[in-house]
Image (cartoon, rainbow, N blue to C red):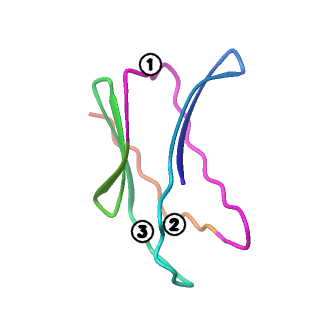
Amino acid sequence: MVNFTRHVDNRVVGNISQGIKWPSKKKLEQVWKLVCDGDVLSFYVDDMEILKVRYMPLDFTGIGFYTFGKQTLIVDEMTFTQN
């Protein structure tokens, strides 16, 4: 699942989520991309758009990962590019 949550003064003021059906493989490599273009934030997995957030102010930024069940997530590399 991809989940975008916006907090203001430690309160959740916006939340958008999208479920994803992952291939059932023991080891899966993916390329995730988060793109901010003006007031549109888009999330891609392997160049396929999964979630698009519009009209939500992006005053502060942060990113986090979580798993549930018997899963392990390994983040090999993270690159931030600002244009």
Q: Earlier in the sequence, mark 3 or mark 1?
A: 3
Q: Nearer the viewer, residue 62 or 13?
A: 13
Q: Which residue is mark 2?
A: 76
Label 3 to label 1, Cα distance in Å?
A: 28 Å
Residue 57: mark in rendering: 1
Select label 3 or label 2 by which is in front: 3
Please state the horizontal and vertical placement of residue 6, each as a whole percent of the image.
57, 27
Q: Earlier in the sequence, mark 2 or mark 1?
A: 1
Position above or below: 55 against 22: above
Residue 66: mark in rendering: none
Circle 1: residue type: Pro
Magenta region:
52-72
Circle 2: residue type: Asp
Please state the horizontal and vertical placement of residue 13, each as a whole percent of the image.
61, 20
Indicate left or right for 45 with 16 as reference: left
Q: How many marks?
A: 3
